[in-house]
Image: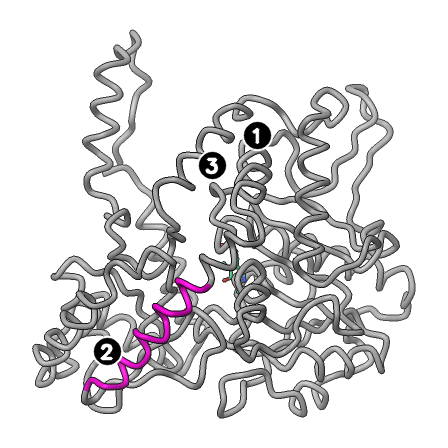
Amino acid sequence: MKQEKLPETGVPEQELMAELDRIKESDLDWKRGRSFSLIYNAGEELMRVGNEAYGKFILENGLSPMAFPSLLKMETEVVSMVAGILGGDENVVGSMTSGGTESIFMATKTARDRARKIKPGICAPEIITSTTTHPAFDKSAHYLGLSIIHVPVGDDYRADVEGIKNAITENTIMMVGSAMTYPHGMVDPIEELAAAAAEKDIWFHVDSCLGGLILPFVKKLGYPVPDFDFSVPGVTSMSADLHKYGFTPKGASTVLYRNSGYRYFQYFAFADFPGGVYGTSTVSGARTGGPIAGAWTVLRYVGENGYLELARKAMDTTKKLIAGVRAIDGLDVIGEPHATVFSMKSDTINVYALSDELHKRGWMIEKQHLPPSLHVTVSPFHENVADEFLAELAEAVDAVRDVDASNVSQEAAMYGMMATMEDRSLAKELAVEYLNDLYKLK
Ligand SMILES: *Cc1c(COP(=O)(O)O)cnc(C)c1O
């Protein structure tokens, strides 16, 4: 195996900067709007403002709010603004985290620790959710020693309320709904799920990592979005990412609780450390102030009217794309998505081959499975490329009409195979092997 050595003498700055630019060239070229995942693009101006604010606090340390009251002020104000966007009153509290995964981890841990206190008889705590819920819950359950049950979604690709109700047992400590789901862009029936949870005194979390900063504005524009936030009785906690549709620099998310009585169980303190009494609100110890300052600045720079305008652009573009996809012979959209995320499927063509074909043309469309589909997250910036994309999509569909499953890329073939493997633990092992192989020096 290879090993990279620390250079004996330092490399000159200019040389390093040039090298950074060079290695960056092989990255996803998202700035032209040709990617439909990973990046949420609202144009250069917001990136500049976010970057500048981020840069001012990149070296500061959020571990000590006493030393950096600026970060404490900005974090509490960001949390309060997001609570307001999500129908919360002044009792709603929360924390900023590094991302959706950490927000979900904190909510899950908090629900677990509260259950330990108020339902001490439960020895094998479990979470009930849907097949389309984000894997961050599986990851959290794995880390926290909880079991998790995924109830299949209904024909409309939304959570199956009856199925979930039937899955509740005396060990259930948490139920989860999504607004919206990552794979298909659906808002689960949150009101019904929250009512079912409240009836049994079970913690109910709404994952709006994806939808939290777009659905409220889409709803205000008059689109039919089901209620999904703190305005719904029975919603205990929510997660909402700022670095997605908040268009803030990465490393910024929020986890929110209906009141501080719930959040109490999130905190960690250790009083016996010789280095001082140690207490943190989230997983992180030392944390950069960059994302906090970036989020605080971008939220205030854009404002309510700005987010409404960005939501309008993204919705208009989504409507155009969905109509355009449905007009292509052989291609369809899964279900009736509620906002700016959807997925493409086909009964006649191999969508993985279609993804490869689009990739050749410079478009990046992620593959999904169970069922096979292609993921589309629409940003406001995509309004500039929607027509071009639809024209090239139609050409790409024609190009792969006769491609059979044996004639696709290795990745596409793997996707096709993974979904059909009977033994899911083997599928999981393959994925871990893949990571093992990926993270080595080349
Ligand atoms: C992105 C996402 C997450 C996880 O967020 P990260 O910021 O990637 O950690 C969780 N839930 C949903 C629905 C998401 O789209």
Q: Position of residue 157 (x, y in %)?
A: 49, 84
Count neighbours of disc 1 (C-alpha within 10 A) and say few if under 14, some if 14 to 19, many if 20 or more: many
Mark 1 or mark 2, which has the lower sequence index?
1
Mark 3 or mark 2, which has the lower sequence index?
3
Check disc 2 and report its element: helix, strand or loop: helix
Residue type pointed to by label 2: Val
**Magenta span includes 42:** no
Q: What residue lies at 77% left-to-right and 19% top-to-bottom? A: 275
Residue type pointed to by label 3: Gly
- Quote the CA–CA distance across marks 1 and 2: 41 Å
Say if mark 1 contacts mark 3, CB within 8 Å. no
Q: What residue lies at 81% left-to-right and 25% top-to-bottom? A: 273
Check disc 1 and report its element: helix, strand or loop: loop
Q: Is residue 391 above or below residue 302?
A: below
In the image, 328: left or right of 427? left
Residue 288 - label: 1
Q: What residue lies at 34% left-to-right and 74% top-to-bottom? A: 418
What residue span does the magenta drawing correspond to?
A: 312-328
Q: Nearer the viewer, mark 1 or mark 3?
A: 3
Residue type pointed to by label 1: Thr
In the image, 405: left or right of 82? left
Q: Label 2 belongs to which residue?
A: 351
Q: Label 3 belongs to which residue?
A: 50
Q: Quadrant of the N terminus?
A: top left
